[in-house]
Amino acid sequence: MPFKSQAQRRKFAELLVKGEISPETFEEWNRETGDAKLPERVTPKAVKKAAKKPVKKPEKKRAKKRAGTTRKKAATTR
């Protein structure tokens, strides 16, 4: 199975150094790939999109409160 990208080839080389794959496996993949020009990555890394800011709705105009407009209700007796 040939390598699909340079990143994959580097990863296999790293696994070879760590001893997680055999030298035969690495050589087999390398041989099958040959001297083909490989892309850096098969698919480009996903670009993180900036979080969308919520659209501010225009605020409704509020009536201004006047000083002294609240009155106590007088107790009325009938």
Image (cartoon, helix red, strand yellow):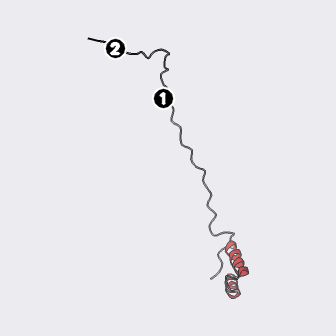
**Quadrant where the N terminus lies?**
bottom right
Query: For residue 40, which quarter of the picture?
Result: bottom right
Q: Within 10 Å of the Cα at label 1, are there few (<14), some (14-19), or many (20+) other Cα atoms? A: few
12 displayed left or right of 61 = right
Q: Secondary structure at mark 1?
A: loop
Return the residue nearer the eye: 65 or 13. 65
Label 2 is placed on what type of residue? Ala
| Image x and y of residue 42, in percent | 63, 70
Which residue is pictured at 71% across the width and 86% down the height? 23
28 displayed left or right of 67 = right
Q: Given the current orientation, which residue lies at the most extreme left position?
A: 78
Return the residue nearer the eye: 4 or 63. 63
Label 1 is placed on what type of residue? Lys
| Image x and y of residue 74, in percent | 36, 13
41 up-or-down from 68: above or below: below
* Res. 35 visible in picture: no
Q: Which mark is residue 75?
A: 2
47 up-or-down from 60: above or below: below
| Image x and y of residue 41, in percent | 66, 69
For label 1, the residue is 60
Depth check, mark 2 against mark 1: the one in front is 2
Which residue is pictured at 61% across the width and 61% down the height? 46
Q: Which mark is residue 1?
A: none
Return the residue nearer the eye: 78 or 24. 78
7 displayed left or right of 67 = right
Which residue is pictured at 71% across the width and 75% down the height? 10
46 up-or-down from 67: above or below: below
| Image x and y of residue 32, in percent | 67, 84
